[in-house]
C-alpha cells in the first residue's frame, strides 16, 4: 500500500491521545490518531476513574467537554470502606456529595472523547510494526497491514509498551513484583448479596501485607475487583488463566481464612480472571529533545497505579495541544516547553505511587491505609485523603501497548 503524509500523528487512542486530538481540534489543528484496536468496542476499557480537579477535570475543560463529563458521573461512587481480612469494618465513609473527584467509567469517558472528534480522526486496526526516522523531524510509521504513513510530528500516546518511546529513550518498564488480578461480579444485589454488602455503595479496600482485595461498585449492578498479590512473575506464569475455575481457585487459595464475602469477589466471578502485571519506568524518566517526536501518559511516565495515571495522561494531552496551538509555526519550541513542564510536573508522582503501594501491601496494612485516609499518617503529595480511586486507580493495564 502507498504511503501518505499527515502533519500530526498520534499513536494510541487512549484518554491522553484522544484529549490531545480534541484540544487540537478545538484550536482548528487537524491530527490523525492510529490505534491497534479493531474498533472502539473490541475490548473492555477498564473500570471507574476518579477525575481530579487540577489535572483530569482541567484537561476536559480545555477540551470543551465539561458538560459531557458531568453527564456520565456515577453519583454516590465516592463512598469508601476499609475492611480487615475477617470482614471487620475499619473505616466507612459515605459519599455525601462534598468530594471533588467524581467517578466515571473509563469507557464512558473514552466515548465522549471519541464522539467529540471529526469522523475519520481515529484510524482503527493500525498496529505499528516499526518507526523510521527520516531526518528533519519527520518519521515513517509502518503498520501490520503493510501500509505506511509519514508524519511531521509524532506523538507516542501508546502506553506502557510504547513503540514510539525507543526514538527518544532506551528505558523499558520493569516489573514491580506486584500483579493485580481482575475479576467481575454481575447482578450483585440479587446474586451476590454478601459480597455486595461488603463492598457497599462505592469502593472497598481490604489490604494486608503482600496481598489485598480492592473492589468498586459500578453502574448496572457490577462489582469490579482487583486482587493484589506481591509475587514473582514466575508465580503467575505457572497459572493457566485460560482455565477460569482453576485460576480463580489458585488465586483464592492465597486468601485462605479470609471472610467468605471477600473471597467471593474472587471465586464467584462470571468471567475468567485477568492478570495485570504492574510495571514502572525509572523514577523521573526523561529524555533529551528529539526533533519531531514526543511522548505523553504511560509512554512517558509509567508508574504503579496510584489514582493519578489517567488524570496525568489527559493533562499531558491538553498541555501538549495548548503548546502546539501557542507555537503553530515553531513545533520544536512547543515540544520543548511541553516536555520540560511535564518532567517537572510528574517527577514527584513516582515516589507517591510507591508509597501508595506500600500503604496497601506493606507490613502495616490495613492500618497504614486507615491512617492515610483519616489523616493520622502522612498524606501523599498533599492530596485530599478521601476517595483515592480505590487507591489502585481501577485502570491497571488498560493503557498498555495500544499501537
Image (spheres, rainbow, N blue to C red):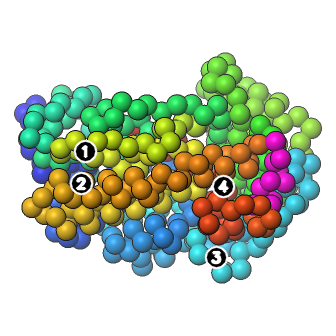
The span from disc 3 to disc 4 (Cα, nearest Å) is: 15 Å
Residue that carries the numbered disc 4 in the rendered image: 391
Residue visible at 67% across and 46% down in the picture: 357
Res. 66 in view = yes
Residue that carries the numbered disc 1 in the rendered image: 289
Residue visible at 44% across and 39% down in the picture: 160
374 falls in the magenta region: no
The span from disc 4 to disc 1 (Cα, nearest Å) is: 34 Å
Check disc 1 and report its element: helix, strand or loop.
loop
Residue that carries the numbered disc 2 in the rendered image: 335
Decide: is 359 above or below 49. Answer: above
Check disc 2 and report its element: helix, strand or loop.
helix
User: Closer to the N terminus: mark 2 or mark 1?
Assistant: 1
The span from disc 2 to disc 1 (Cα, nearest Å) is: 8 Å
Instruction: Give the mark toward the camera: 2 or 1.
Output: 1
Residue that carries the numbered disc 3 in the rendered image: 99
Instruction: Give the mark toward the camera: 4 or 1.
Output: 1
- Contact (Cβ within 8 Å) of mark 2 with mark 1: yes
User: Closer to the N terminus: mark 4 or mark 2?
Assistant: 2
Disc on res. 155: none
Q: Main secondary structure of the magenta part?
A: helix
Q: Nearer the viewer, residue 154 or 185?
A: 154
- Contact (Cβ within 8 Å) of mark 4 with mark 1: no
Decide: is 256 above or below 331. Answer: above
Residue visible at 24% across and 63% down in the picture: 323
The magenta stretch is 363-372
Residue visible at 81% across and 32% down in the picture: 254
Check disc 3 and report its element: helix, strand or loop.
loop
User: Closer to the N terminus: mark 3 or mark 2?
Assistant: 3
Amino acid at each position: 500500500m502507498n504511503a501518505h503524509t499527515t502533519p500530526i500523528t498520534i499513536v494510541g487512542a487512549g484518554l491522553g491521545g484522544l484529549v490531545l486530538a480534541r484540544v487540537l481540534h478545538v484550536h482548528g489543528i487537524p491530527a490523525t490518531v492510529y490505534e491497534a484496536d479493531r474498533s472502539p468496542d473490541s475490548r473492555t476499557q477498564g473500570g471507574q476513574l476518579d477525575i481530579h480537579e487540577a489535572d483530569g477535570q482541567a484537561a476536559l475543560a480545555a477540551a470543551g467537554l465539561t458538560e459531557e463529563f458531568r453527564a456520565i458521573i456515577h453519583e454516590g461512587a465516592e463512598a469508601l470502606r476499609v475492611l480487615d481480612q475477617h470482614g471487620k469494618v475499619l473505616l466507612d465513609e459515605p459519599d455525601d456529595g462534598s468530594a471533588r473527584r467524581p467517578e466515571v467509567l473509563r469507557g464512558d469517558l473514552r466515548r465522549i472523547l471519541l464522539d467529540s472528534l471529526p469522523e475519520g480522526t481515529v484510524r482503527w486496526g493500525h498496529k505499528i510494526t516499526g518507526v523510521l526516522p527520516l531526518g528533519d523531524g519527520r518519521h515513517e510509521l509502518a503498520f501490520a497491514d503493510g501500509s505506511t504513513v509519514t508524519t511531521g510530528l509524532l506523538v507516542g500516546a501508546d502506553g506502557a509498551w510504547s513503540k514510539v518511546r525507543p526514538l527518544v529513550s532506551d528505558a523499558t518498564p520493569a516489573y514491580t513484583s506486584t500483579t493485580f488480578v481482575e475479576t467481575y461480579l454481575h447482578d450483585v444485589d440479587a446474586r451476590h448479596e454478601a459480597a455486595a454488602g461488603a463492598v457497599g455503595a462505592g469502593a472497598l479496600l481490604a489490604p494486608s501485607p503482600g496481598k489485598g482485595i480492592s473492589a468498586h461498585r459500578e453502574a448496572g449492578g457490577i462489582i469490579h475487583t482487583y486482587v493484589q498479590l506481591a509475587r514473582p512473575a514466575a508465580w503467575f506464569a505457572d497459572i493457566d488463566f485460560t482455565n477460569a475455575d482453576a485460576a480463580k481457585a489458585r488465586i483464592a487459595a492465597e486468601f485462605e481464612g479470609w471472610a467468605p464475602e471477600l473471597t467471593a469477589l474472587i471465586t464467584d466471578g462470571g468471567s475468567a480472571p485477568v492478570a495485570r502485571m504492574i510495571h514502572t519506568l525509572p523514577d523521573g524518566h526523561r529524555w533529551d529533545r528529539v526533533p519531531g517526536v514526543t511522548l505523553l501518559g504511560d509512554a512517558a511516565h509509567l508508574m504503579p497505579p496510584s489514582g493519578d495515571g489517567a488524570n496525568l495522561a489527559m493533562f499531558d494531552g491538553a498541555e501538549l495541544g495548548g503548546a502546539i496551538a501557542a507555537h503553530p509555526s515553531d513545533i520544536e519550541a512547543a515540544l520543548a516547553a511541553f516536555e520540560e513542564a511535564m518532567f517537572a510536573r510528574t517527577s514527584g508522582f513516582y515516589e507517591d505511587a510507591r508509597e501508595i503501594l506500600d500503604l496497601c501491601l506493606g507490613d502495616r496494612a490495613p492500618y497504614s491505609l486507615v491512617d492515610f485516609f483519616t489523616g493520622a499518617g502522612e498524606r501523599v503529595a498533599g492530596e485530599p485523603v478521601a476517595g483515592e480511586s480505590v487507591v489502585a486507580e481501577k485502570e491497571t493495564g488498560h493503557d498498555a501497548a495500544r499501537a
